Amino acid sequence: MRFEPNEDQATFLSVLDQMAEDAGAAWEVPADWSRFQWAAGLDRTLEENGFFDCAAEESLGPVAAAAMVHRLARLPVTLEVAASALLRPFLPKGLPRPVAVIDDSPAAPIRFLPVAASVLSLSGDAVRVAVLAEGDVRPVDSLFAYPMGVFARTIGDWQRLDADPNAVREAWRVALAAELGGTLRGGQDAVLAHVRERRQFGQPLGSFQGVQHRLAGAGTKIEAAYWMTLRAAQGVDPADSAVALGYVQNAATAAVYDLHQFMGAMGLTLEHPLHRWTYRARLLKSALGGPSGNFGLVARRKWRAA
């Protein structure tokens, strides 16, 4: 695949890079030792400047939205970007965000629910949304480095959207692939910084060939996942979204293992951000059926088309 951003996309991504370097997005050890840090300031800045509307802009489109999700998932702080960016064209105008997405059992803890203003349900054969009120949600403790929550009471005021559930689900697959790929890339960047600085036998740890080979192998898969996600965002082939998500989910297990191998015990402590990326990855790699479910979907689509 060849992807050359147009002028608007290049400017959009350049400004996004500058925002991602903001002090509010940097790693810091939280005073309460929490496993995630909600970046309220950066989230507000992105919304006020219209970044979440990029998928609907003709000169930006879903490709720019997927690239934004990937870029912001690399940060050690937590932001709800995937649904707000890739699913925004399907949602009612003025629907408050952040948006939590139910794509499995509504009884299970849901990502971003404690910070969400609305919730989107992809279960069944319809897409529904509801605006959340105070008292609707109860936060729960979790290792997954996201704000997680469950419903404290039954949500009755659901609105059925006039949207193709299959199209929404495909966009959600692209969003999850972008988020998981960016999460792995963020962990990789942290480990690369560590092996450049950490010294063994008088040399940087990253100078040893065995370390280089393992990290290069993981890096190749993480980079491939990014380009597959951008391909899927273009919407050329309906199977591309399942390929992209299945591929990065399949690569995540080995990538997470290698990242922790070269970080050592420090990567499991709350004093270093690696655990934030790898525990996010542990949750995302099982989304929408995991790699086997997504690869099975690809096979069924290809056989039907043959």
Image (cartoon, grey):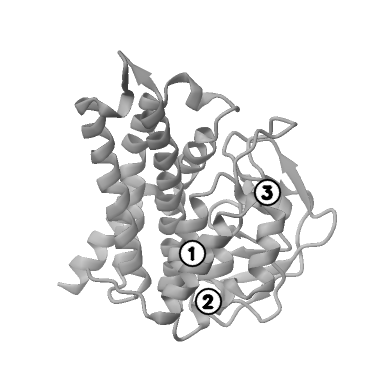
Residue drawn at x 50%, y 52% as measured from the top left? 73
Few, some or many residues within 10 Å of mark 2 (<14, 14–19, 20+): many
Q: Dot 2 lies on which element? A: helix
Q: Where is mark 2, residue-wise?
A: 54
Quarter of the picture holding the C terminus: bottom left
In this view, the residue in front, 254 or 28, is 28
Residue 213: horizontal and vertical position, in percent?
21, 33
Few, some or many residues within 10 Å of mark 1 (<14, 14–19, 20+): many
In this view, the residue in front, 55 or 176, is 55
Spot the residue most to the front: 202
Q: Dot 3 lies on which element? A: loop
Whole-Å distance between the Cαs marked 2 and 3?
22 Å
- The kind of residue on which mark 2 rests is Cys
In this view, the residue in front, 304 or 117, is 117
Q: Is residue 14 above or below residue 91?
A: above
Q: Is residue 217 above or below residue 267?
A: below
Residue 215: horizontal and vertical position, in percent?
28, 36
Horizontally, residue 283 falls left or right of residue 109, namely left
Please say if the residues under marks 2 and 1 sit with CB atoms less than 8 Å apart.
yes
Q: Where is mark 1, residue-wise?
A: 68
Residue drawn at x 42%, y 36% as measured from the top left? 193
Q: Where is mark 3, residue-wise?
A: 38
Spot the residue most to the bottom: 58
